[in-house]
Image (cartoon, helix red, strand yellow):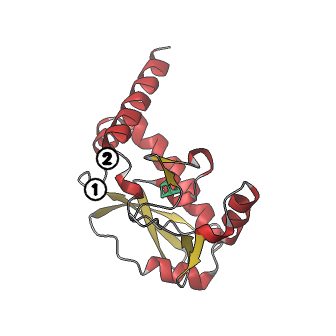
Amino acid sequence: MKDTCITEDWLLRAEDICMKCGGHCCDGAHPPISPKCRERLISLGIPRDAFESVGYLRLKVQDDGQCILMKGGKCSIHTIKPETCRAGPFTFDVTGDRINIYLKHERICPIVGLLKAVPEAYRTQYELAARSITQLVAHLPPDELEVICRIDEPDTDKVSEIPRLDA
Ligand code: SF4
């Protein structure tokens, strides 16, 4: 019972932090989309012109720079959002058969402070991130993965290395 209360407490705190932040993680966000994820999103009603290819497939942004699927300050596809959106504030790159997992700095994402203060919160989000990123890496075409891994992501610290499923 006590554990449940602690879990509920950090989930509520996380929700509060995200609400107050206002979704800055979706400003200028172009989450990479695997072919499998694209088909899933289209089958669930996302229009085909929400995507663009710039060496890899990604979601477009609106005129104000927010992700095209941000509506009224919230993600309009929260329960089915792409892998890197589920993984945040963890991110990744790939070296050979290993996936390097990074955590963004707190000044980039305020939820990081909570993750560092509450081990249960960190473990839960890290495990979700590792699963999501592993699936994405396995489903991306190799040439697109290479382009994605060249994108600079400053203000991050490496926190782990995990094996690729597809290596
Ligand atoms: S899909 Fe949703 S969570 Fe991901 S960047 Fe777009 S609005 Fe944000």
Pointer 1: residues within 10 angstroms few (<14), some, or many (20+)?
some
Secondary structure of the residue carrying tag 1 is: loop
Q: Residue furthest right?
A: 43
Indicate the amino acid at tag 2.
Val
Indicate the amino acid at tag 1.
Ile
Where is the C terminus found, in terms of image quarters? Answer: bottom right
Q: Residue furthest top?
A: 1
Frontmost residue, 86 versus 131 = 86
Q: Which mark is residue 108?
A: 1
Measuring 28% from the left and 56% from the top, which residue is drawn there? 108
Question: Would you say the residues marked 2 and 1 are in contact, meaning their CB atoms lie under 8 Å apart?
Answer: yes
| 80 versus 58 height, above or below | above
Kindly identify which residue carries mark 2.
112
Q: Is residue 43 left or right of residue 56?
A: right
Between marks 2 and 1 in the image, the one whose residue lies nearer the viewer: 1
Measuring 31% from the left and 47% from the top, which residue is drawn there? 112
Pointer 2: residues within 10 angstroms few (<14), some, or many (20+)?
many
Frontmost residue, 146 versus 94 = 146
Q: Residue furthest left?
A: 107
Spot occupied by residue 91 in the image (x, y as percentages of width and height): 43, 62
| 25 versus 141 height, above or below | above
What number of labels is visible?
2
Q: Which mark is residue 35?
A: none
Q: CA distance from mark 2 to mark 1?
A: 9 Å
Secondary structure of the residue carrying tag 2 is: helix
Quarter holding residue 5: top left
Quarter holding residue 66: bottom left
Spot occupied by residue 164 in the image (x, y as percentages of width and height): 59, 68
Frontmost residue, 164 versus 107 = 107
| 122 versus 95 height, above or below | above
Spot occupied by residue 64 in the image (x, y as percentages of width and height): 38, 63
